[in-house]
Amino acid sequence: MEALKRPLKKAPLKEKYDSFNQIDGEHPLQEEVEDFCVLYDVRLRPHGKVVYFNFNLAKEMGLISQDHPHKLNKRLEKKLLESFGLVIINEYDLAHRPDAVKKFQKKDKKFMATRYLQLQHPSRKGETSGDGRSIWNGHFESDGVTWDISSCGTGATRLSPATALSNKFFKTGDPSISYGCGQADLLDGVGTALMSEIFHSNGLKTERTLCLIEYSKGSSINVRAGKNLLRPGHFFRYLKQGRHDCLRQIVDYHIDRQISNGEWQLLKGFQRRYDYFLKDMTRTFATISAVFEAEYVFCWLDWDGDNILMDGGIIDYGSVRQFGLYHHEYRYDDIERMSTTLTEQKHKAKYIVKTFAQLVHFLKTKEKKNLNEFSDHPCLGEFDKVFKRVKQDIILKKMGFNESHRSYIFQYQKKLLEDFLQTHFYFESYKSDEGLIKMEDGVTHNAIFCMRDLLRCYPSLLEESPLKFNDFLNLFTSHYAMDEDLKKTAYKAKQAKEWQVYYREIVGKVVQKFNLCPKDLYREMAESARKYNKYARITGDSVVRVAKEFIRYKSKIGDVNETVSLMEQFIENQSFEKTFSLRSVKKGPDHEKFLDKIYKIVINHREGL
């Protein structure tokens, strides 16, 4: 009888995925900001197959339930294809295929390709530029937070450089024009998904890949999401054109969006709002340029504010790289122009901040002064202070110091820290005698010392005497070094000695200040340094090769869920908080062997570009 009283166990409810219905092309920017976009009708693109879905991001956004298994099912895949497997009906279609257009089953609402400043275009005022092969799928609201969603590879828009340069519209998929064909590449999509999630797990701001849909001949639609996908280029376009009302509309929208998303506090009065806006832009771009330089992240910052988000998030991973060494003379060759270098990104970020100072003055006064009149603006001095502090903090963190130690060093050991960083930079920036080298996608001058290796290894040597010259260099000499590069000179020997002296003096000051047992501090620093100076860290050279292997392996095993699981494991093990171990690999057909191959690729290219 007792058994009869037990409640029957309910079967789990099947998730309907109705939340995706909110992503329908509609976005407040279409109404709140004048001339912000070009609107396109869209239709479903047939024969797509979902090959990646970011379950962690989807749960964070509220698109799926927190207890949803990390597995695609037929209902979810169908909903993803219906929501994101889209192609625009563009100007070429309307002009050359009117009969076919009439038969297309269009979505109810139009989708926007946004306008922003872009240096690839002949117009320096953003009259023709913007999303050339992307649309914004709309926005999604959950738990008081609004997310933007966009898709790359959805068709050729009128805002691509190809259309601006040739003064004609292109058919989507036209093989005669690469950048203007309107389609995206699956290899780029997988590489972006891996790199952006690794960056996110390590605290770098970035747009994130939500979904990848594969089509024939390696083309794809790559869906991205972020809490705010606005770029400085969206704002600078109105500034360059002198359109005060439109500029005010987009700045007010951005401020309100940051407040509603909980990123900023509530501000009263337009003067205070715009002052806070400039202050935030100063902090943001000083911080991210310092992070990029300290972490060797190349993302081609430039004057147009195109390749970065307003919150400093990384976007457009086509040219983004993470270097293994301080390859500070690498330039990406974009056919018509060469990119900025790693160190020049700071100056471009500062230029962007100066432009924001001009922008805010224009907002307040309706007077558009020459940009040069803002060369001494107080925000630029603040930029330098923030940049210096952030970069120094990152290096101290890599040395293994905790937050309390770093705060003490900043406040009381400034001179000692400056002396150490000067000799640290000597080795970091040391270049090979080989000179400038032409590469497939640009030019570079090889660095030869891996500072991560030095900072990872040295805390474990603190109980020993300082190393002799050759032993010291052997700790962190890369494969790029030539015999001539390592030749002992009086100055180089002096720098090797001083690096160790200053390092040990800083450690000694911390021991004395906090009354620590030296061995305990050494162990703490060694553990932290191993975390932040990962030996097998992915680089731009390795991510392309790793992405190719994932695509091959997906085709081999024919199971998208297994592939997604392996991508998740690889991303997790590139986090500072994790150490790559094959023991953590889920068992399956050749999975261990595959991830071992991936791991070796990362190691083989750990010092590259």
Image: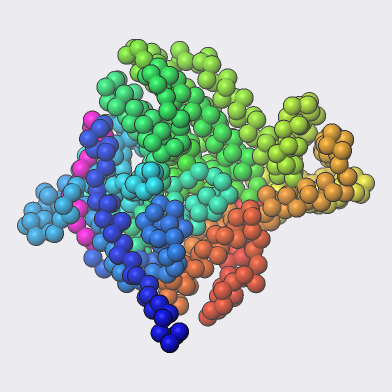
Front-most of residues 393 and 241: 393
Q: Position of residue 604 (x, y in %)?
A: 64, 61
Colouring rule applied to residues: rainbow
Per the rendered image, the range of residues in magenta is 34-45
* Residue 359 can be seen in this image: yes
Q: Position of residue 387 (x, y in %)?
A: 60, 30
Q: How many marks?
A: 0
Drawn side of residue 105 relative to residue 136, left or right: left
Tell whether position 41 is magenta: yes
Say if 107 sits above or below 486 in the image.
below
Drawn side of residue 42 relative to residue 97, left or right: right
Q: Which corner quadrant holds the N terminus?
A: bottom left
> Who's the residue at 9% across and 60% down the image?
103
Drawn side of residue 493 relative to residue 151, left or right: right
Say if 269 sits above or below 212 in the image.
above
Front-most of residues 502 and 540: 502
Instruction: Quadrant for residue 428, please give it.
Output: top right
> Who's the residue at 86% across and 42% down the image?
516
Instruction: Quadrant for residue 398, please give it.
Output: top right
Q: Residue furthest right?
A: 465
> Who's the residue at 75% across and 42% down the image?
401
* Residue 180 can be seen in this image: no
Q: Position of residue 409 (x, y in %)?
A: 76, 32
Drawn side of residue 330 relative to residue 14, left or right: right
Q: Position of residue 78 (x, y in %)?
A: 28, 67
Tell whether position 238 is magenta: no
